[in-house]
Image (cartoon, rainbow, N blue to C red):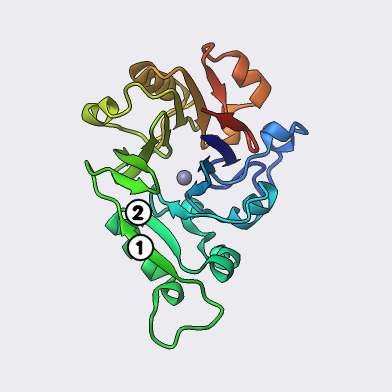
Amino acid sequence: MKITFLGTGTSQGIPIIGSTHPVCLSANPKDKRLRVSVLVAWDDYKYVIDCGPDFRYQMLRAECDSIDGIVFTHEHADHIMGLDDIRPFYFRQGDISIYAHKRVLKSLRKKFDYIFTTKNKYPGAPSVVTNRVKKNTSFKLKNLAVVPINGFHDALQVFGYRFHDFAYLTDMKTVPDEEIEKLKGVKVLVVNALRIDPHRSHFNLEEALQFIDKVKPETAYLTHISHLLGFHEEVEKTLPRNVFLAYDGLEVII
Ligand SMILES: [Zn+2]
């Protein structure tokens, strides 16, 4: 399995438009972060987790010319607003499969009504096949069983996903113990770490490290990073030996 980090930034991305914060002005490419997403590839299959406003450029940058589907964590704008840009995939492949909680499907239907409509549909609009993800119910993506991990982003329910030896959790603030059990034995864990100071809906660095300590993966990567976490090179020096900051373009083979 190959994981490609398409974006590792928080909702505004880094740099933030107009910001003069030193991290936003950094020349290091690892300090430039598009909105959060990963490409998960195995055998001949490719799925993306989330489809934010940078989706088009992320697909071009990763030279990804086909996808088998999109798995959504939740409905916030930084995770869904690229959905219109599935058009090139739709034109070549037909309807695109999407997977999400029923609340997220409802939100997508409202925001992208022209994609979901069946009446007088504009010929250039893409189409999707919806698949509902339910708590405590694993689902198949081709030949792989995927386990949803139920957590909370402040009060909002969010799904993380376990793909065999790999698990991806973003926008988490609380994860119940019974859900942490579902992550046991995972080799590579990706989890959100927003910044140093606490935040009401995201793990800060300390909470992310405590969470990693509970799951005990072989290796962990931090994502959904704000400029307020600091410079990539400096923060990484402070981390435990098996924990790394993800950066855009990073590929991990599992
Ligand atoms: Zn987010």
Q: Which residue is depicted at the point 66% across and 46% down? A: 62
For disc 2, the neighbor class at 10 Å (few under 14, some 14 to 19, many from 20) is many
Q: Which residue is depicted at the point 33% across and 18% down? A: 214
209 sits left or right of 233 in the view = left
In the picture shown, does residue 209 fall above or below 118? Answer: above
Give the farthest residue toward the top. Answer: 241
Query: Residue 213 or 142: which is nearer the viewer?
Result: 142
In the picture of the structure, the residue carrying the numbered disc 1 is 130
How many discs mark residues in the rendered view? 2
CB-based contact (under 8 Å), mark 1 and mark 2: yes
User: What residue type is disc 2 on?
Assistant: Ala
User: What residue type is disc 1 on?
Assistant: Thr
Question: Where's residue 126, x and y in %?
Answer: 50, 72
Identify the mark nearer the N-term, 1 or 2: 2
Give the farthest residue toward the right. Answer: 27
* Secondary structure under the numbered disc 1 in the rendered image: strand
Query: Disc 1 versus disc 2: distance between alpha carbons?
Result: 8 Å
In the picture shown, does residue 220 fall above or below 56? Answer: above
Question: Where's residue 98, x and y in %?
Answer: 41, 58
172 sits left or right of 103 in the view = right
In the picture of the structure, the residue carrying the numbered disc 2 is 100
Q: Looking at mark 2, is its residue's CB closer than 8 Å to ligand 1?
A: no
Query: Residue 96 or 103: which is nearer the viewer?
Result: 96
Quadrant position of residue 154: top left
Q: Is residue 163 visible?
A: yes
In the image, which disc is placed on residue 87? none
Q: Is residue 195 visible?
A: no
* Secondary structure under the numbered disc 2 in the rendered image: strand
Q: Which residue is depicted at the point 52% across and 48% down? A: 46
Query: Residue 11 or 95: which is nearer the viewer?
Result: 95
Q: Which residue is depicted at the point 54% across and 67% down? A: 90
